[in-house]
Image (cartoon, rainbow, N blue to C red):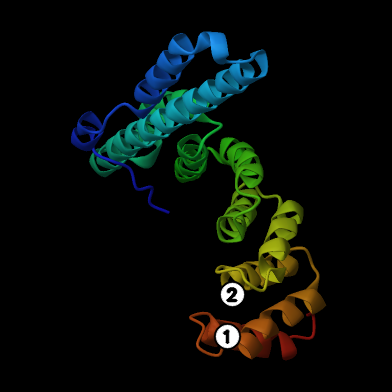
């Protein structure tokens, strides 16, 4: 998801819509105040509030995305020069500040997901889980992004050796038929089931990859694993 916003140069050239429209409304009310009823004044006031909200909301979106872009670029540069954990420590405060100031708009929500990924890459799995769970609410109406976050939660729980919760989230990603990560989730879920000692579930899950994804990058590996399980008396 790439947010499209105007450049600083374009913003400077564009008339200030809020100030222009507000000025016209105030001039109208001043010149014809004796003819305007109280109800119409109330409507004008509400209209001005609405215009003001839209103006400042748009300004906030542009600023949030601009700061996020700068912070993300800084992180990538630091990561390339040092390491993921060190880069995380340097930009963590900046991400928290973006989320605190703009968490209610698109830029802040996107910052939360990116910060979750950065936390995961730095080995801060508990922090990543916390952020991913918050992001589920942010993107509950965007199925594609929501499924990616659910799948990421499965990975994070794997990293903290919690296969029970890992299975819960991989199951959610695997049962979403429109999920872009369904194949990947099925693969991970098969191994998680095996770790939990649920061999039958593991075999059924891995078999779905062979049935539904004949061109899967996991196909040969899964085929070999299922063949091995068939010949293993303990499985």
The residue wearing badge 2 is 183
The residue wearing badge 1 is 213
Determine whether 6 is above or below 168 in the image: above
The Cα atoms of the two marked residues, 2 and 1, are separated by: 7 Å
Mark drawn on residue 88: none
Q: Which image quarter is the C terminus in?
A: bottom right
Q: Nearer the viewer, residue 27 or 210?
A: 27
Which residue is found at the position 36% from the left and 34% from the top? 62
When asked about the image quadrant of residue 134, the answer is: top right
Residue 41 in the image, given as x and y percentages of width and height = 59, 16
Which residue is found at the position 73% from the left and 90% from the top? 230
Q: Nearer the viewer, residue 206 or 97?
A: 97
For label 1, count other residues whose C-alpha is less than 10 Å away and answer few (under 14), some (14-19) or many (20+). Answer: few
Q: Which image quarter is the N terminus in?
A: bottom left
Q: Element under label 1?
A: loop
Residue 90 in the image, given as x and y percentages of width and height = 35, 27
The reply to whether residue 35 is visible in this rendering is yes
Residue 96 in the image, given as x and y percentages of width and height = 48, 26
Which residue is found at the position 51% from the left and 38% from the top? 112
Q: Is residue 81 left or right of residue 209?
A: left
Determine whether 13 is above or below 123 in the image: above
Residue 180 in the image, given as x and y percentages of width and height = 55, 69
Which residue is found at the position 67% from the left and 18% from the top? 39
């Amino acid at each position: 998801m790439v947010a499209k916003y105007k450049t600083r140069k374009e913003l400077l050239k564009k008339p200030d819509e809020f100030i222009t429209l507000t000025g016209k409304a105030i001039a109208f009310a001043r010149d014809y105040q004796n003819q305007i009823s109280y109800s119409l004044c109330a409507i004008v006031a509400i209209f001005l509030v609405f215009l003001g909200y839209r103006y400042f909301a748009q300004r906030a979106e542009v600023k949030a995305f601009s700061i996020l872009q700068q912070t993300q670029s800084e992180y990538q540069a630091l990561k390339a020069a040092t390491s993921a954990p060190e880069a995380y420590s340097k930009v963590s405060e900046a991400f928290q500040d973006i989320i605190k100031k703009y968490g209610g708009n698109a830029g802040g929500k996107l910052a939360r997901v990116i910060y979750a990924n950065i936390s995961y890459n730095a080995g801060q799995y508990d922090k990543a889980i916390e952020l991913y769970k918050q992001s589920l609410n942010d993107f509950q109406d965007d199925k594609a992004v929501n499924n990616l976050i659910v799948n990421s939660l499965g990975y994070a729980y794997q990293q903290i050796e919690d296969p029970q919760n890992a299975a819960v989230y991989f199951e959610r990603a695997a049962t979403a038929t429109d999920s872009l990560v369904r194949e990947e989730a099925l693969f991970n879920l098969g191994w998680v089931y095996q770790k939990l000692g649920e061999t039958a579930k593991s075999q059924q899950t891995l078999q779905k990859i062979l049935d539904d994804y004949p061109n899967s990058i996991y196909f040969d590996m899964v085929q070999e694993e299922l063949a091995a399980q068939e010949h293993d008396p303990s499985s």
